[in-house]
């Protein structure tokens, strides 16, 4: 086990800046998820930790060692690549124990670890096959098995579940979480799937355009997004946003929008928005809006666009002024398209952002 410190990493490919001034402290034994859209620099960051990329600038420490000048083999890491490279000329079993053989572990220990990993990844009946005789998802699991048998200080995984079907993915997600609790290897896990990130991460580092936008626990990043981008990237459906103006009314604060005054939670100084004209962006998640069939104090009128039953709930798309919002309603809530409803937003769950920069405004 070891902590990892990334200090102001910068990597360019010609004119493309893949990562810029990226700093991050990963704790010993932590499961850290690097999350972000395609091309934001996740793989580059992971490969930099592994020592597979030469940085333009920056330093990387693993434990207390500065590993920046060290080759991959001397960093105490094991990596599962996005392209799940396995040795084509070796059977599955030999692929899995390859690193253990290099380390000259006793045969008995090799067999024990391989059996355990194969069992975990449900590839026990494939050990005699060659990679060419496997499906993509099976090959990916061999790559994961090969990394975990090493019991590395640092385990780096780049989208290791991307080629699995939905059910197996769900299963493997839970298994990886269990495995991490057992091994406690410091793990950096790359994905663009926010559900996977929320489920697996002790913390999530959300990246955009080569930079880290927010690092937080899944709960905090979901509940208190640092920017509009974070609120829109995390959550399905994502956070809703409404343009409005912050006003004082009857001693309390409201956001005026679409002819209504949406009350904010009492207490705390009014947040300072840029520009000083009181314009704000109000963010709220679909499950923190209640749809009502009659108006109530502080509610906003909306028109139903579509109602989608999604099993345990109904998902409503409604129009407020010129904007569309998603609202989760109980499965027995019924409304036809075109019908008027009223929305009550939970004041404790409303987040205000600066409309220009998209940054969260804190009281
Ligand atoms: N060898 C390379 N040469 C030139 N540009 C590269 C190279 N590798 C990556 N890039 C660019 O650097 C940026 C970051 O790439 P990276 O592979 O780190 O993204 P990613 O977040 O892993 O994306 P994905 O989710 O699609 O895997 C992209 O714009 C990519 O096109
Ligand atoms: Mg990638």
Image: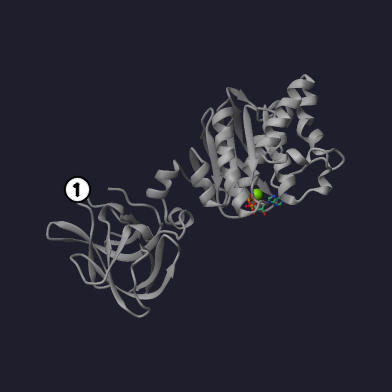
Image vertical order of residue 109 relative to residue 17, above or below? above
x and y, in percent, of residue 349 in the image: 31, 53
> Residue 254 lies in what quarter of the image?
bottom left
Residue 67 appears in the rendering = yes
Image vertical order of residue 93 relative to residue 238, above or below? above
x and y, in percent, of residue 110 in the image: 75, 25
Q: Quadrant of the N terminus?
A: top right
* Residue underneath mark 1: 267
> Residue 318 lies in what quarter of the image?
bottom left
Q: From the viewer's perspective, is 122 left or right of 180?
A: right
Q: How is the image coloured?
A: one colour
| Camera-nearest residue between 149 and 285 | 149
- At label 1, counting other C-alpha atoms closer than 10 Å, the crowd grade (few under 14, some 14-19, many 20 or more) is few
Say if disc 1 is inside 8 Å of ligand 1. no
Image vertical order of residue 47 relative to residue 329, above or below? above
**Residue beneath the point at 31% across and 48% down:** 362
Image vertical order of residue 363 relative to residue 335, above or below? above
The residue positioned farthest toward the left in the image shown: 250
**Residue beneath the point at 29% across and 73% down:** 341
- Secondary structure of the residue carrying numbered label 1: loop
Residue 83 appears in the rendering = no
The residue positioned farthest toward the bottom in the image shown: 338
> Residue 121 lies in what quarter of the image?
top right
**Residue beneath the point at 27% across and 52% down:** 348
The residue positioned farthest toward the front in the image shown: 125
| Camera-nearest residue between 136 and 87 | 136
Q: From the viewer's perspective, is 254 left or right of 350?
A: left
The residue positioned farthest toward the right in the image shown: 89
């Amino acid at each position: 086990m070891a902590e990892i410190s990334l200090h102001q990493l910068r990597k360019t490919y010609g004119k493309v800046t893949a990562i810029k001034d990226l700093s991050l402290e990963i704790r010993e034994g932590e499961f850290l998820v690097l999350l972000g859209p395609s091309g934001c620099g996740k793989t580059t960051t992971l490969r930099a930790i592994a020592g597979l990329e030469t940085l333009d600038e920056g330093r990387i420490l693993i434990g207390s060692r500065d590993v920046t000048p060290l080759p991959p083999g001397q960093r105490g890491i094991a990596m599962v690549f996005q392209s799940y490279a396995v040795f084509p000329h070796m059977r599955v079993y030999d692929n899995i124990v390859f690193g253990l053989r290099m380390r000259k572990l006793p045969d008995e220990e090799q067999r024990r670890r391989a059996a355990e990993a194969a069992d975990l990844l449900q590839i026990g009946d494939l050990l005699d096959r060659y990679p060419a005789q496997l499906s993509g998802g099976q090959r990916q699991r061999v790559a994961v098995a090969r990394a975990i048998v090493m019991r590395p200080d640092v385990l780096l995984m780049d989208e290791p579940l991307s080629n699995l079907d939905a059910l197996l993915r769900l299963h493997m997600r839970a298994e990886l979480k269990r495995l991490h609790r057992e091994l406690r290897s410091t793990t950096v896990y790359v994905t663009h799937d926010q559900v996977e990130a929320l489920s697996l991460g002790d913390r999530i580092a959300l990246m955009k355009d080569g930079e880290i936008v927010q690092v937080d626990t899944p709960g905090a990043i979901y509940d208190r997004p640092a920017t509009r981008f974070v609120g829109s990237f995390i959550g399905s459906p994502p956070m809703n946003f409404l343009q409005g103006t912050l006003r004082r009314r009857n001693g309390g604060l409201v956001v005026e929008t679409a002819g209504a005054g949406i009350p904010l939670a009492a207490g705390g100084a009014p947040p300072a928005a840029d520009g000083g004209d009181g314009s704000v962006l109000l963010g709220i998640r679909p499950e923190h809006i209640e749809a009502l069939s009659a108006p109530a104090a502080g509610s906003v009128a909306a028109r139903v666009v579509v109602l989608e039953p999604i099993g345990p709930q109904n998902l409503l798309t409604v129009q407020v002024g010129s904007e569309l919002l998603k609202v989760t309603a109980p499965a027995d809530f019924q409304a036809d398209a075109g019908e008027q409803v009223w929305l009550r937003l939970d004041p404790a769950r409303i987040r205000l952002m600066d409309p220009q920069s998209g940054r969260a405004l804190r009281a």
